[in-house]
Image (tube, rainbow, N blue to C red):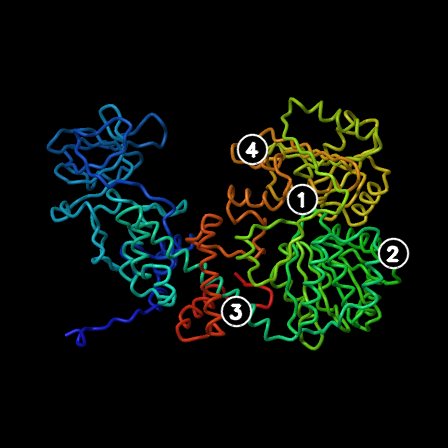
Amino acid sequence: MMLDARVRWPRPSLLGTPITALAGIGPKIAAEAQAAGLASIGDLLFHPPGSYRDHSRIGTVAELRIGSEATVIVSVESARARQTRRRGMTLFEAVVSDATGSIKAVWFNQPWLAERAVPGARMLIHGIPDRGSVRVSAHEFLGPEEIDNAKRPGRRDAAPGRRPPAGIHTTGLVPVHPASERIRTQQIREWVWQALGMARDAPETLPSRVRARRELPGIADALWGVHFPNSGAEAEASRRRLAYEELFLHQAALASVRARREETRASLLVAEPGELTARWLRSLPFSPTSDQLAAFAEIDADLASETPMQRLLMGEVGSGKTVVAMYAMLRALESGGQAVLMAPTETLAEQHAMTLDRLLAAEPIQFGLLTGSTSARGRKELLAKLASGELGLIVGTHALIEPGVRFAGLGVCVVDEQHRFGVDQRAALDSKGTGGRPPHVLHMTATPIPRTLSMTAFGDLDVTTLTGLPDGRLPIRTWLVGDERREGAYEFVRERLSEGRQAYIVCPLVSESESLGSRAAAAEAERLSRDEFSDFKLGLLHGQMSGPEKKSAMAEFASGRTDVLVATTVVEVGVDVPNATTMIVEGAERFGVSQLHQLRGRVGRGEHESHCILFGTDAGELARRRLEAVAGESDGFRLAEVDLALRGEGEVLGSRQSGIPRFAFATLPEDHLLLVEAREDVVDLLRREGSLEIPEMSIAMDAVRSRFGELTSVGIRA
């Protein structure tokens, strides 16, 4: 009777079993596998193939065709190993045959085959036939009982310590798992097959109603199907199920972050907008855009709530993010609190200080600047004023979150280029709030982030986007050119300089590198000052200069005393010189799409038409497609989608501190529909149940805590 049937419950703890429990893995191989990230049974189960080789048909020797991959079952007639003229190269050759004919099989640098490839031995070989021979890429030896079973490995016999069946390397859809220099794909394939004997012990993290709604297979079937599928359809269905699980758990993690934040009270409850912000808005020499006005309203609503604001402000270069940030900070000041603006570099912090100085010209509001270059005396004075509340507004770098910095009543924090700050740094800023309560935080980025990435990297934040540009801004004309047009490009820049404009020349390096063959800023500045731009004054700016040197170089350029600024990507953010209308980017193929778009945004900030010239001489096919996208598209958000499609999610933001997890099975943007479905299901559970801490989500939430680690108020520690 069914009631008497033996019930077997999964034992997830067994997935932590060391891989030494598998046949053929001793301490030395285990150490090499661990270096490749494969230390346990679970590591192997969740180490997906990067691709598959289709060896689904076993043919005969007579059917072999030159240049066409094939698999055959053969018997060894004779074999020998011999040295070649090439030093260190050994050939192993065997004459093999079946009922339809014979052929010579060739292996490179595998002389140990002589021990088993003896006359009469039966083998499965896969390779590419040439004239009279076949170069073997995979092989297996067969015992008498294995020949009939060679076409498909049996799932039911998989178990640690049991030798894999015939055919896993040479027949069917053969998985190709990512390997390392010391661990071969064939070894990993054999280990994974053994590990699959414990697939039933993998926890079923997805609630049953979610699996039913999305028609997803169980975890054990999905693991089998992704590693050793019977068909391409089964492989994709299995991968899709495992990818969905990753995205679902991550969205559950983000929802937990948000729920925890909503249980926390802000350090400052900001009153309705007052006379200070109203007077400041009237003093601006321009009218805020509709996007900026909408952002003001969203910030007002956030600041009126007891829940600490966690908002991401995304905007094109020049879209007016600093004005929105200034509004948020003034709201804190008029409510009796303090505000900070934190930037990732001294150059950017100094530029923000200059911008705030202009924006506050009509208001008697003092603010400070705290960076690593601040003198000991200046630092002491600033810290004393912050602790006493005498100073309400300060701009700085990570120096603002050092242990000795204390605030009397920190109400609003603005974090610029927030993806450059790690979770720990942002959490340290949260700890500066009053009475142990976090301040309101506005995160800003000029890097346009595609929706699929914002849902994963910043899914716990409210998002505001500035898409419109201020009135009077002209589009930047961009060209991708080769070295053959270099003289013409220089002449074009000289003409603009003669009209009274200024120019940037951006180089990928500080000093010359023969191995990279890239133009370097220091050497290029010296060469250009002698040759093409000898009639103009050149400046140099790069990250290895001291703080005072960088400040001086920027001041010279901003004042117009320098005509051309030769720089590295230190000018990528924060440098605002409206009179600079032309930019040349050397070695443009070495930059990403978003970075080029940010660099280009240094021009086009005034009333004159601006131009960006990209030199991409050594660009490969993928790099050229990126450069052509930049040249043909001015909308940063559309460019970000192109960049994501070309490169994948790992590089777009350019930093592992961005908070994007490393998914094993899911890939963005290809899996964006899965991401939307996972988010919908998490939101649906929250709406119906009021919490994710419910019985049917208990296994999932255990997996969230295990997989994503400590949940913090500003993100996930990956």
Q: Are marks 2 and 1 in contact (CB under 8 Å)?
A: no
Tag shown at residue 598: 1
- Judging by the rendered image, the residue that carries numbered circle 2 is 361
At numbered mark 2, what does the secondary structure look like: helix, strand or loop? loop
Q: Are marks 1 and 4 in contact (CB under 8 Å)?
A: no
At numbered mark 3, what does the secondary structure look like: helix, strand or loop? helix
690 on left or right of 62: right
At numbered mark 1, what does the secondary structure look like: helix, strand or loop? helix
Front-most of residues 103 and 90: 103
Considering only order in the chain, which callout, 2 or 3, is on the residue closer to the N terminus? 3
The percent position of residue 227, horizontal first and vertical second, equals 31, 51
Considering only order in the chain, which callout, 4 or 2, is on the residue closer to the N terminus? 2
Q: Is residue 540 above or below residue 385?
A: above
The residue located at (87%, 56%) in the rendering is 361
Considering only order in the chain, which callout, 1 or 2, is on the residue closer to the N terminus? 2
The residue located at (35%, 49%) in the rendering is 236
- Judging by the rendered image, the residue that carries numbered circle 3 is 256
Considering only order in the chain, which callout, 4 or 1, is on the residue closer to the N terminus? 1
The percent position of residue 524, horizontal first and vertical second, equals 72, 32
**Which residue type does callout 2 highlight?**
Ala
**Which residue type does callout 3 highlight?**
Ser
Q: Are marks 3 and 1 in contact (CB under 8 Å)?
A: no
**Which residue type does callout 1 highlight?**
Gln
Measure the alpha-carbon separation of dots 3 and 1.
33 Å
Front-most of residues 268 and 280: 280
**Quadrant in the picture for the N terminus:** bottom left
Measure the alpha-carbon separation of dots 2 and 1.
28 Å
- Judging by the rendered image, the residue that carries numbered circle 4 is 624
Give neighbour class at mark 1: few <14, some 14-19, many 20+ (Cα, 10 Å): many
Q: Is label 2 or label 1 in front?
A: 2
Give neighbour class at mark 4: few <14, some 14-19, many 20+ (Cα, 10 Å): some
